[in-house]
Amino acid sequence: MKQAICSTLTAVLALLIAEISLPKSVTAKLLVQVPATKQVGGCTGRTCTSYRINYERAIAKGVIERPSWVADEEQAIQLGYQAIEKGDRYEAAIRFAQALVLISENYDLKTALEFEQNLDTTLQQEKGQTLREFLPTFERIFSLSVSPPQTDTPYRINYERAIANGLINRPSPVVDEQEATELAYQAIEKGDRYESAIRFAQALVIISETDGTTNALDFERRLDAYFLEQENQTLREFLPLFERILPLSGNLYR
């Protein structure tokens, strides 16, 4: 069901971005596959998703104004694309943000992240820029959207400090720690140690927040053992940037 939802949303977006003209009856048939959803409104406590929290914070701080009501995420996506056609990137960013908040609340965070990734890929293909490059306001709204709301772990604190200090750029969102780890190994194969360090750090932040700091430490130790065996260097020796991102994680967290 979740895959069908994401596939339907992605299909709608792809058709819009690619400017494919379909008969209204066909378009309507595609859109109604996802049930109508509620307007972006308020939430309390654990009902707030990370998308919602960042979205409401952006409104409260005056980064954006609250957009007008939409019937569902499909309409928000359509309005986002229409804004792109008109050259209004500010409005497009707000509407795509509105759609992602609705998806995260009506389905789940994973579905919203998957759709954000698909949107990112589509814009790269059609516009030559990532979602956050093409729509800078979107980046300002969802600068922390990849992590669920919870108490910061030591991994998270060091990771966010590295980004705030300009040591690294915030990487694109991933669905889970497994995807972050796979991207890290792919980066090693390409000889990109910078990307690899960031992705391993991203994976450890996710593990620490979803499974606990102890499990994150265990995973880091396994990585360390792997690099000693394969490269005759520790994780932090092989990836010096990793040490700069998480300088105390090997000792402070024990």
Image: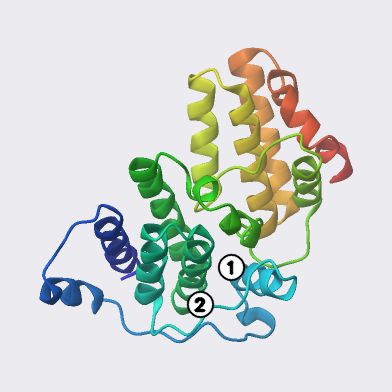
Mark seen at residue 32: none
Return the residue nearer the eye: 119 or 106: 119
Q: Residues within 10 Å of mark 1 (few under 14, many from 20)?
A: many
Residue 163 position (above or below residue 247): below
Local packing at callout 2 (Cα closer than 10 Å; few below 14, some 14-19, many 20+) is: many
Q: Which mark is residue 51?
A: 1
Residue 36: quarter of image: bottom left
To which residue does mark 2 refer?
A: 105
Residue 202, picture quadrant: top right
Is residue 120 at all visible to an observer of this figure?
Answer: yes
User: What residue appears at the point 63 percent right and 52 percent down from the top-left corner?
Assistant: 206
Q: Position of residue 52 (x, y in %)?
A: 60, 73
First-in-chain label (1 vs 2): 1
Give the x, y percent position of residue 48: 63, 77
Asked whether disc 1 touches disc 2, contact meaning CB atoms under 8 Å apart, the reply is yes
The amino acid type found where label 2 is placed reads Glu
Q: Residue at x 67, y 74 (%)?
A: 59
Amino acid carrying mark 1 in the image? Tyr
Question: In the picture provided, is 225 more to the left or to the right than 1?
Answer: right
